[in-house]
Amino acid sequence: MIKMDIISDVACPWCYVGKSYLDRALEQRADHPFALEWHPFQLNPDMPKGGMDRREYMALKFGDRDNVVRIHAPLLQHAEKAGITFNLDRIARTPNSLDAHRLIHWAGLEGRQTPVVSALFRAYWAEGRDIGDAGVLADIAGENGLDRAMIARLLEGDSDRAEITARDTHARARGVSGVPTFIIDNRYAVQGAQPTENWLNIIDETIDNMKEARNV
């Protein structure tokens, strides 16, 4: 297997689109060689722990409603192509995603990382659940095969906060300035929400290169 490190933030809509495009490609190439691992990156590292009212956040970042609608238009077009739903009107708060990244880390230790990442994206962007809330995160953990009570206890403390922050800092030090970023075999970086067609080409090329290497 070839390692694919995915640096993303579940509070990033383009990361959800990028994951969905990749998912479609992996489904079409069941013999793909990639083993996925998810890594933290906070788009808003200075976000208050309790998050911020979504309308207030959008107004501060993008200005008036017309500008917000204009900026969201290409996102919604790509979401339709990727086969996912954004119910932006359901989102009441923009979260601090640090605790969500902690949950993703713990899910990785249990071999449940990608399902939990999928559930977090869906919970926030489609269902409007507050993924900055410890109770919501514990529920998502329980819904996806983790011990809800244990996750709830961990979220009450500071377990792995420093590690998540350090990993975010490390990604930035390596030159990651935006997400999603996909690093293949610790050698090649693919940035942005790449269409499924691009991923199919990458997968096919990778498989061909592996076959050639075996035949040398």
Image: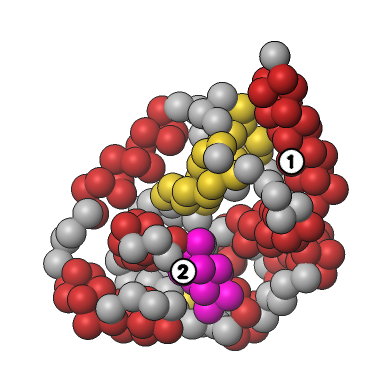
Provide residue 181's location: percent of width, then percent of height.
58, 41
Q: Along the polypeptide, which appears first: circle 2 or circle 1? A: 2
Q: Is residue 104 visible?
A: no
Instruction: Specify start and end residues of the magenta stretch as a single range.
Output: 114-124
- Per the image, the residue denoted by label 2 is 116
- Residue 203 — which label? 1
Disc 1 is placed on an element classified as helix
Above or below for 208 versus 97: above
Provide residue 216's location: percent of width, then percent of height.
70, 14
Could you tell me what secondary structure mostly forms the magenta stretch? helix
Q: Residues within 10 Å of mark 2 (few under 14, many from 20)?
A: many
User: Residue drawn 84% across and 64% down?
Assistant: 81
Q: In the image as oriented, which residue stretches furthest toward the top? A: 216
User: What amino acid type should be assigned to the residue bearing mark 1?
Assistant: Ile
Quarter of the view holding residue 2: top right
Above or below for 106 versus 188: below
Disc 2 is placed on an element classified as helix
